[in-house]
Image (cartoon, helix red, strand yellow):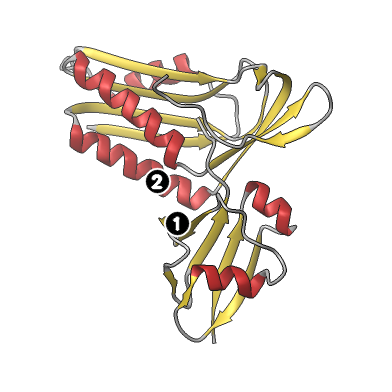
Amino acid sequence: MQTIKVLYFASLRELIGTSETSIEATGPVGAAAVWKAVNPSVELPDSSLVAINQSYASLDSMVQPGDEVAFFPPVTGG
Amino acid sequence: MTSLIRVQTDALEPWQEIAKFQTDNFNGHTDFGATATFVGTMRDLNEGDEVFEMTLEHYPAMTEKKLAEIVVEAESKWPLLHTLLMHRVGIIKPADPIVLVAVWSAHRAAAFDACRFLMEALKHQAPFWKKESLVSGQSRWVAKNTSGTS
């Protein structure tokens, strides 16, 4: 069984209380469904961004087993 | 064409880095007529509150990928000779440099435009986040960047 690695950054990391978790996956699953599976009782904040394998994606994007999906707030670097 | 991208926790010394980059990479080249630089520095005031220090967090693997992508994009849009992009992470104090963008080109239009493009692309796309510690003792995440055009 392969896993999907799930990462959180900044305010989302604090909201969830961890920076990383993983779920087992047998096939592709939407990014929104990944969030729901790992955080069933926490709504994803509206402005949140999603990246799959370090590239921006949307909540509708499919995550494959073995992928890395990250959830984070709007970026504020520079 | 040379490009150097670096994210570091150590203090960033932009003017020394520019001089070092030229010494290390130019090898006597005399083809550049324009150098444009941007240095972003931490302010001690944000949203009307005094800021004591800031913690900059990032998503290392994605930062690296995204910064490399925006440099490639700039190089495809303008005839750049060299590009230097550096960003601080970790704990930052007021007046500390946070970001350095420097570009070298034959003429000023490409240098100015590419420097601005790189800075705006970094601000909007690179996965960095700032958390402010206020003089009042509170701390808060910066919710969004200011506009680069007003």
Residue B121 in the image: state x and y as whole percent: 38, 35
Labels 2 and 1 touching (C-beta < 8 A): yes
Residue B27 showing in the rendered view: no
B7 with respect to B83 (left or right): right
- Image position of A57 with respect to A23: above or below: above
Q: Which residue is mark 2?
A: B66
Residue B7 showing in the rendered view: yes
Q: Residue at x 72, y 59 (%)?
A: A16
Q: Which mark is residue B43?
A: none
- Image position of B126 with respect to A21: above or below: above
Pick the quarter of the image with the C terminus of chain B.
top left
Residue A33 in the image: state x and y as whole percent: 55, 73
**Chain at tag 1:** A
- Other-residue count near label 2 (Cα within 10 Å), few / some / many at <14 / 14–19 / ≥20: many
Tag 1: amino acid:
Gln
Residue B100 in the image: state x and y as whole percent: 45, 24
- Image position of A5 with respect to A57: above or below: below
- Could you say whether the residue bearing mark 2 is in a helix, strand or loop? helix
Q: Residue at x 28, y 15 (%)?
A: B35
Q: Nearer the viewer, residue B99 or B9?
A: B99
Q: How far apart in space, not on screen, are marks 2 and 1 (Cα)?
A: 8 Å
Pick the quarter of the image with the N terminus of chain B.
top left
**Chain at tag 2:** B
Tag 2: amino acid:
Lys
Q: Which residue is mark 1?
A: A54
Quarter holding residue B98: top right
- Other-residue count near label 1 (Cα within 10 Å), few / some / many at <14 / 14–19 / ≥20: many
B3 with respect to A35 (left or right): left
- Could you say whether the residue bearing mark 1 is in a helix, strand or loop? loop
